[in-house]
Structure formats: C-alpha cells, structure tokens
Image (spheres, coloured by chain):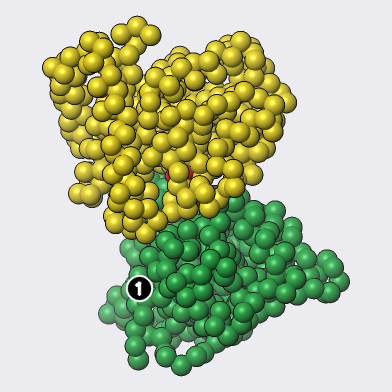
Amino acid sequence: MREISYADAVVEAIEEEMDKNEEVFVIGEDIGRYGGAYFANPKLWNKFGDERVRDTPISESAIVGFALGAAITGMRPVAEIMFCDIMTVAMDQIVNQVAKMRYMFGGNVKVPLVIRTPIGGFHNSAAQHSQSLESWFAHVPGLKVVMPSSPYAAKGLLKTAIRSNNPVIFFEHIQLYRQKGPVPEEEYYIPFGEANILREGKDLTVVASAVMVHRVMNVANKLEKKGIQIEVIDPQTLCPFDKETILSSVKKTGRLLVVHQACKTCGFGAEIAAIVAEEGFDYLIDSIQRLGAYDIPVPFASNLEDYTIPNEQRIFSAITEFLGK
Amino acid sequence: MDSKKLIELLETMLRIRHFEEEVGDLAARRKILGSVHLYIGEEAVAAGVCANLRQNDFITSTHRGHGHCIAKGGEFRFMMAELFGKTTGYCQGKGGSQHIANFDLGILGANGIVGGGMPIASGAGLSIKMRDTNQVAVCFFGDGCCNNGVFHESLNLASVWNLPVVYVCENNQYALSVPVKQSSLIQDYYLRKDAYGIRGCKVDGNDVIAVYEASKEAVERARKGEGPSLIECKTYRWRGHYEGEFDRHYTYRTKKEIEEWIEKCPIAQFKGYLIENNIITQEKIDQLEKEIQRELLEAVAFAEDSPAPKPEDALAGLFENE
Ligand SMILES: Cc1ncc(C[n+]2csc(CCOP(=O)(O)OP(=O)(O)O)c2C)c(N)n1
Ligand SMILES: [Mg+2]
C-alpha cells in the first residue's frame, strides 16, 4: 500500500470531501496561499481558491463562531485553530454555543462543524504551545472528540467528522504531521467509537492516544524481549468512547495503565480509570495506574520538558514497576 | 534632542540588531531550540519607545519580544541563558524565547498568545492609577493582534477608565502569512483611536526619532493622567516569521519587497543622519559595535557555561509556598 504523511492524509480527507460537497469549506489562519502553518501544502487553496479556503485574521472566536453560524444555515465548515492552546481564545463559542446549540434548541438544528486543532509539545515550545487539552472538550456534553494517531486514522476519521452532522473537535498532533504510514488509495471512512487494538498481550492493558501510542508501542517491543506482553489500545475517539474494547481487554489482562501527554490531574485517564473501576472492577487483579505529564505548565528547556511529559523510559519503568518485574 | 540621547538610541538599536543576528545564527546551528521570532528591521520601534521609559515603567511584549526586552534594559547574558534553557536565564530556563520576563525591569512578559499582553498592560495601567505611582504601561503588539477581541476590550476599557497606557502597534504588514490588506479594510489601525475617543498617530516605524517623539508625547500624557494613546508604527520584518521558515515567506511576499525594506534599514538611516550631522563618527560607531559584539560573545559563553536545570527542577515553582 502507498505511504503518505499524516499531514497529507488530513489534506486528502478535506480535499475529497470538498470535491464531493460544495457545502464543505475551510476557515482558519494561514491556511490559504501559505498552505497551513505546519503543512506547507497549499493544495486546497490552489484547487478551491479564496472562496472555499478562507484565510482569516487572528480572530479565533470569529473563526469558530462564523463556522457555527455557517454550519447551522446550510454549510459544512472545517475550521482550523493553529494550536489547541489557542482554542482557549474561542472557548465561549466552542463550549457555550457550538456544544449546546442542538440540544438546547430542542434538537431542531444540525451542527455539521469540524474544528481541527493540533496538540504541540516535545520541541521546546514551552507553556503556551505544548498543552494537550482533549479532556476539557470531552468534559463538555455535545462535542465529539477525535484524536487520531496515524495517517490512516487521521484520514478516515476526518472524513467521518466532515460527514457528521454533529460538532467534532479533531485533535491532530504536530509531532505526527511528518510521520508516514499506509493509506489506501480507495476511499474509506472510520466510524467513531471504535478503539483500535494495536497489539495484543496478556499481561497488561495500556490505553494511549496520539503520540503516546507510538511511545507505548516502542516500549512494548522492549518489554517483549523481557517476556512481558502488553496489549495496546488507542481509543481513537474520546467521545464517543469505546469502553467495551477496553473492558474486554482488562477482563483478559486484569490490569490497566493509561498513558497520556496531558497532565495527570483530570486528564482523560481519570475517566478511563473510573469507567473500568465502575464497570470492570471484578476483572482487576491490581490497582489501576495512570501516567500523565506532571501537573505543571510545560517548561521550555529540553531536559525539563522531557522530564515533564512521559517519555519512553518513564513509560517503561511505570510498566515494569507496576508488574513487579 | 541632545547628542547623548541620540547616541543612546543608536546603541539600543545596534544592541538589538547584533543580538538578533547572533540568535539567528545560534538557532540555525541548533544551539538554541524552539521557535525564535526575530525583530531585525523593527529595532527603531522598541528603541524609540523605551527611550522614554523609566526602569519602573511597565511593558508587555509579544512572541517577537527580544527587542522590547533589550530596549527596556534586559541584559544579554540573562536573555541568552534563557534562550539556551539554562538556570541562569531570566526565567530559569522555563520560559524560552517567547516567555522572557523580568519584573525588576518592568518587563511583564513576552507572550506566546497573540493579544495575550493587551489586557495585561491595561491592567498594569489600572494598578498604576489605583496606586497613584506616576508610572506608565506600554503595550507592544503586532498588526495581527488588531483583529482579535482583546484589542477592542482593552482599548475601550482603558479609554473609559482613562488609564496611563500607551498602545504601540508594530505594523510590519503581515501576521505570519496574512497581509494587513487581507485582514482589514482600513489598514491604518491608528485611526481606531477615534472609536475610543483617545489620542493616536501613525509614524514611520523605521525612523527612530519619529517613534521617539510620538511616544514621548504619549508617555508624557499618560504620566500626567491624560489617558491612553494608540501609536501605529509602520515597519517590516526582514526575516521569516520564525527562524526555520526559510524560503516559505516567499509564498506570501516577494524578494523585491523585502529588499526594498532592507533599503530602508532603520539603523543605516539613523547612522547616516548622525554622521551627517556630526553627532558621531564612523570610527565611534565601529567601536560601539565592537563592544556590543564583545559583550554578546561573553553572553553566549555565559549561557553555554551556565548549568542546565536539573530535571526535577521542573516540579518547583508552580505556587508560592504557603
Ligand atoms: C491567539 C493566537 N492566534 C494565533 C497564534 C499563532 N501566531 C503566532 S504569531 C502569529 C502572527 C502574529 O502577527 P503579528 O501580531 O502581526 O506579529 P508579527 O509576527 O508580525 O510580529 C500567529 C498567527 C497565536 N500565537 N496566538
Ligand atoms: Mg505583523
């Protein structure tokens, strides 16, 4: 199968949906002629022009709010916010408007809106460009929350997001944009709410998203050599959340560790731990463990940053200590 | 203006230029990590404005903040150490290029969020007024910030409350790749002064004397309790939006346009003026630059030799101990 980058997979998904449906358009900062702050790929702008690839001023509330206004009146906008840290600037529109509209108005309106935003981190971007804020959005009823970890998932899930009549917060990851992976030429969609089992194992269930999936997979290979077999699961979407896959994995392994880039307190790991404690308590042969960033803003210096966000070494020792090996 | 002041203006601009060139070089050699946004070409703005400020006056800065910091008295070695992520840096290596602050010098912080500093500078203005301290707060921000909600919220409230704040718009004509003409029908942002009923003007941001004079008036007014002003400095950034953007900036602006602005170099212009008017000689300037260069190399050595933080230092400092 051909291999393309995560960034190209994102562009391809949007392009295909724009080809199919005139209602789809993109709106955000530096996405036109410049081709995106990270992508350096003006393909969409070259093909669809200013009208459907709308560069905006630095006006995040307007980006989201305009997209919402357009979405409820017949368009299907794909908005982009340059960093997930900057979603905060548009928070009223996202939390009080986008998420509430359909329900609050008695189900009388469709909200076919995607907000794409990348998570940063791992490259000295410091406190305001390195956060992983997915759990904030998962906490707000009315938003679908998607977090792909591969080019294949990025394309298939984004196409589903654009097709959805519900608002979707689509978290990409700056560290993954250049990563290549197999993506079929044929069109496909990946449904929401289906976790992906990346690797089967009997000793421990490890749940991870985005970049942490790759770190955990590398650690899994090392553990294999020590005779430890971990099962690695990427939920892919946090809302809807596929708890069945995780519960049945824990039923098999008896142990759960959740690893995420976001800081530990109130991270999505807390939710997963709570679900398993509530619904899979009898399967557990040990306490549930979480590994997240320390509860501090991400510091600038390389060694401080590396210490703060779980690295492979920390994941490795968390697992070996957990298993007492 | 007396010649001492004029030479100080030149020196500040030269300090910024040399620092930024060195940082660009260090970033290219990956000695400095993370994004760095250089101020080269815009030196007259920070130098001209800050020459009117006292040490206890406040500024807020932006992602493109090194120039503001130097002009407000920031020392090369502590800045450099911060860029190297060392414990001796202004923020102990926790902030980096986009987050330099020094409260003793009234530098209330560079900012990674466009517009983040606008209400903060305004709040500093409020505090000055409430504490009745005769200080002034200056808010530096880019053209890109003018279309974010915080611009309006800040200028409106500062004007109704008559706060001692000088808003300095550094209109370098692009917000990353987006040209001002694509963001605003009215491209003279200073005209918004009338919407708030405050004073304001437009100046050639490459003319340090013009910047100095305009901000002098605004700072004096603020100090006298006559309220905020909005000064727009038209200027241009020579480098990419960030180091490492490389040639991608040719996707949104032409080489010719950049070259035309390099012709209008604020430092070259000002040097010419000073020499022509016998305020300084070329030899004196050469000597000045040599000294700056020496101080810079010492700063780099200081940064290189300074200890890196211990990883566990990451955990310290979130709250003050209570
Ligand atoms: C609220 C917010 N939106 C977007 C960004 C990403 N970003 C950083 S700098 C920049 C351009 C800023 O342009 P301007 O204010 O004109 O300053 P300049 O870079 O030209 O000095 C953008 C879009 C950000 N940091 N914060
Ligand atoms: Mg600008």
State which chain is coloured yellow.
B
Using residue B88 as the reference point, say whether residue B180 is left or right of it: right
- Give residue B267's quadrant in the image: top left
Asked if residue A202 is positioned above or below residue A107 in the image, the reply reads: below
Residue drawn at 80 percent across, 73 percent down: A109
Q: Where does residue B30 sit, x and y in percent of width and height?
A: 23, 50
Asked if residue B141 is positioned above or below residue A204 in the image, the reply reads: above
Give chain A's shade. Answer: green
Q: Nearer the viewer, residue B14 or B117?
A: B14
Using residue B114 as the reference point, say whether residue A213 is left or right of it: left
Q: Where does residue B315 sit, x and y in percent of width and height?
A: 43, 44
Q: Dot 1: what SS?
A: loop
Q: Where does residue A190 sit, x and y in percent of width and height?
A: 55, 85
- Give residue B101's quadrant in the image: top left
- Give residue B73's quadrant in the image: top left
Q: Nearer the viewer, residue A313 or A196?
A: A196
Furthest residue toward top: B2
Of the residues shown, which amino acid type is indicated by label 1? Gln
- Label 1 crowding class (10 Å Cα cut-off): few <14, some 14-19, many 20+? some
Q: Where does residue A39 sit, x and y in percent of width and height?
A: 40, 66
Q: Which residue is mark 1?
A: A179
Placement of the N terminus of chain A among the 4 image quadrants: bottom left
Q: Nearer the viewer, residue A143 or A203?
A: A143
Residue drawn at 43 percent across, 54 percent down: B177
Asked if residue B12 is positioned above or below residue B96 in the image, the reply reads: above
Residue B69 visible at all:
no
